Amino acid sequence: MSLLLKSIFILLITFLFQGCIVGTVVAAPFKVAGAVVNTVTPDIVGDTISATGDVVDMVIPF
């Protein structure tokens, strides 16, 4: 294989396993709000909000 093809392959593998920050950024407000709500309400309410952030983080593939 040529050096260019090897480099592209390595970069592709790196990006596939690394993931991008979009899902994490979108999920962050839910996780923070869940932690804040957890301090003043029953745990189930804050945990539900935090779980929504986790689901958003998993669903967004980029």
Image (cartoon, grey):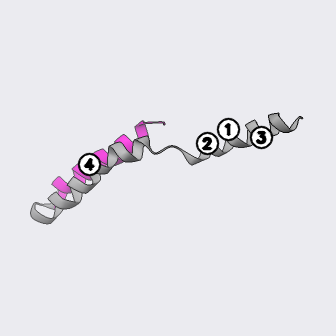
Front residue (pair 29, 48): 29
Q: Where is residue 42 shown, x and y percent of the image?
A: 12, 60
> How far apart are the two marked residues, 4 and 1, measured between alpha carbons?
30 Å
Residue highlighted by disc 4: 30
Residue highlighted by disc 1: 12
Question: Predominant secondary structure in magenta?
Answer: helix
Kindly state the secondary structure of the residue where label 4 is placed.
helix
Q: Where is residue 60 shown, x and y percent of the image?
A: 42, 36
- Tell me: 7 left or right of 47: right
**Nearer the camera: disc 4 or disc 2:** 2
Give, as a three-letter code, the residue at label 3. Ser
Give, as a three-letter code, the residue at label 1. Leu
- Give the mark nearer the N terminus: 4 vs 2: 2
Q: Can you say which quadrant of the picture contains the N terminus?
A: top right
- Give the mark nearer the N terminus: 4 vs 1: 1
Residue at left offset 41%, top offset 37%: 59
Residue highlighted by disc 3: 7
Give, as a three-letter code, the residue at label 4. Phe
Residue at left offset 61%, top offset 41%: 16
**Label 2 Cα crowd, 10 Å radius (few <14 / some 14-19 / many 20+):** few
Badge number at residue 15: 2
**Nearer the camera: disc 3 or disc 2:** 3
User: Is label 1 in contact with label 2 (beta carbons under 8 Å)?
Assistant: yes
User: Is label 4 in contact with label 3 (beta carbons under 8 Å)?
Assistant: no
**Nearer the camera: disc 4 or disc 1:** 1
**Nearer the camera: disc 3 or disc 1:** 3
Q: Is residue 6 magenta?
A: no
Badge number at residue 3: none
